[in-house]
Image (spheres, grey):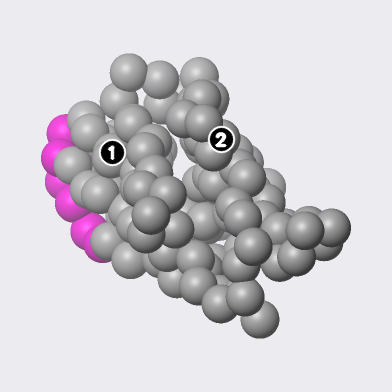
Amino acid sequence: QVQLVESGGGLVQAGGSLRLSCTASGSIFSINTMGWYRQAPGKQRDLVASITSRGSTSYADSVKGRFTISRDNAKNTVYLQMNSLKPEDTAVYYCNSYLQTTQTTIGVYWGQGTQVTVSS
């Protein structure tokens, strides 16, 4: 089994910063892309940022220049540094990973989500 465990959410004032972490554990052969999604109440879950195993990154337009995604392959961990936070960043943030449990088996896995609340 594979688990993705997030941490680092919380309450912060507008303009502040938070750092989210997500560690994958279990029967893992290799990890391909890791990323962060978010879902605000009544809205769909949207991609925030992603990073490939080689370090190529992609960001939603709404967070470019404010958020930075990074990963530590040795620790199977992905981070999301969030700066200049805005009230509209308030959402549940989910870690996501495409990973292989064997040489030929690949799947998509999700964390349980961590709440980020930005007050105005």
Residue placed under numbered mark 1 in the picture: 82
- Residue furthest front as drawn: 103
Q: What residue type is labelled 2?
A: Thr
Q: Where is residue 5 in the image (x, y as percent from the top left)?
A: 45, 71
Circle 2 packing at 10 Å, graded few (<14), some (14-19), many (20+), is some
Q: Is residue 80 above or below residue 60?
A: below
Residue 114, by quadrant, is bottom left
Residue placed under numbered mark 2 in the picture: 52
Judged by depth in the image, the label closer to the viewer, 2 or 1, is 2
In the rendered structure, which segment of residues is drawn in magenta?
9-16
Q: In this view, does 99 lie above or below 61?
A: below
Circle 1 packing at 10 Å, graded few (<14), some (14-19), many (20+), is many
Decide if residue 113 is on the left or right side of residue 105: left
Asked if residue 42 shows in the view, the reply is: no
Location of the N terminus (image quadrant): bottom right
Decide if residue 66 is on the left or right side of residue 1: left
Q: Where is residue 52 in the image (x, y as percent from the top left)?
A: 56, 35
Asked if residue 46 shows in the view, the reply is: yes
